[in-house]
Amino acid sequence: DTGVSQDPRHKITKRGQNVTFRCDPISEHNRLYWYRQTLGQGPEFLTYFQNEAQLEKSRLLSDRFSAERPKGSFSTLEIQRTEQGDSAMYLCASSLQTVRGYTFGSGTRLTVV
Amino acid sequence: GDSVTQMEGPVTLSEEAFLTINCTYTATGYPSLFWYVQYPGEGLQLLLKATKADDKGSNKGFEATYRKETTSFHLEKGSVQVSDSAVYFCALSEPANAGGTSYGKLTFGQGTILTVHP
């Protein structure tokens, strides 16, 4: 069990560029969640996968955001045409059963300049 | 919708002082309740949890009791250490259900910054 891995740890991009983040969950975990955390706030839910199916998306997930989890393993989160308001920490979490809690990755910090 | 409210911070204490961080929640069902901790430069770590009314979660000297009647899950520690300095988040999760309307996502409070001085 190597935990939840996220790549990259930090990303600086110019406004208008596209960025993609990757999350590798714990191998036996079938549930995968993406959250966004802005400075001084708690994480906010973005989207949820059960295996390869994306079953829930937050209203926070605008049309510029897309997430995939091919084959139910790793997941990617892409942001197109980045805006300064997208600057945040993007967190991935995985779980097997929600009542046992989640394991979070260390996050990808995005800065849009 | 679901929501979590934490006491406003930051909280500054001397080592060995008693800690309480208040947390109240609003939920439509019977959620599980969690406390997560985020140390500087690190990701969120589960500190403790409780899944039903009157359950007490405990870990590393921290405790919290699920109080359904007051919809609260206050975090306490009898004697804090400098190493406890971190941001603490209260969170809830509605159980995933067969109807497909809840998938167990977490709803977080805004976080409370704790600083402990020697």
Image: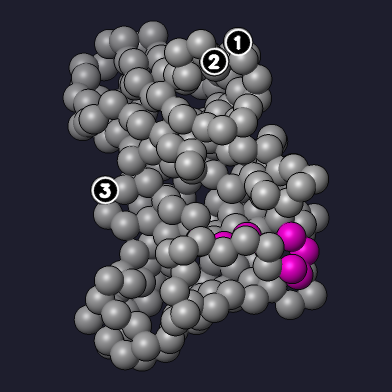
- B48 vs B11, left or right, is right
User: Which of pointers 3 and 2 indicates the residue nearer the eye?
Assistant: 2
Q: Does the residue at mark 2 contact the one at mark 1 (Cβ under 8 Å)?
A: yes
**Mark 2 crowd level (few <14, some 14–19, many ≥20, 10 Å Cα):** some
State which quarter of the image contains the C terminus of chain A.
Answer: bottom left
Residue A41, given in percent of the width and then of the height, sits at: 31, 48
Q: Which residue is mark 3?
A: A40
- Calculate the distance from the C-alpha at mark 3 to the C-alpha at mark 1: 31 Å
Q: Residue at x 43, y 64 (%)?
A: A60
Is label 3 on the same chain as label 1?
Answer: no
Residue B4, given in percent of the width and then of the height, sits at: 41, 34
Specify whether residue A52 is in view: yes
Q: Residue at x 76, y 57 (%)?
A: A30
Could you tell me which secondary element the residue under label 3 belongs to? loop
Residue type (three-letter) at the residue carrying disc 3: Gly
Could you tell me which secondary element the residue under label 2 belongs to? loop
Specify whether residue B36 is in view: no
Q: Give the chain of mark 3.
A: A
Q: Quadrant of residue B23?
A: top left
Q: Which residue is mark 1?
A: B54
User: Which of pointers 3 and 1 indicates the residue nearer the eye?
Assistant: 1
Residue A3, given in percent of the width and then of the height, sits at: 64, 54
Q: Residue at x 67, y 49 (%)?
A: B101
Q: Residue at x 56, y 64 (%)?
A: A57
Boundaries of the magenta span: A46-53
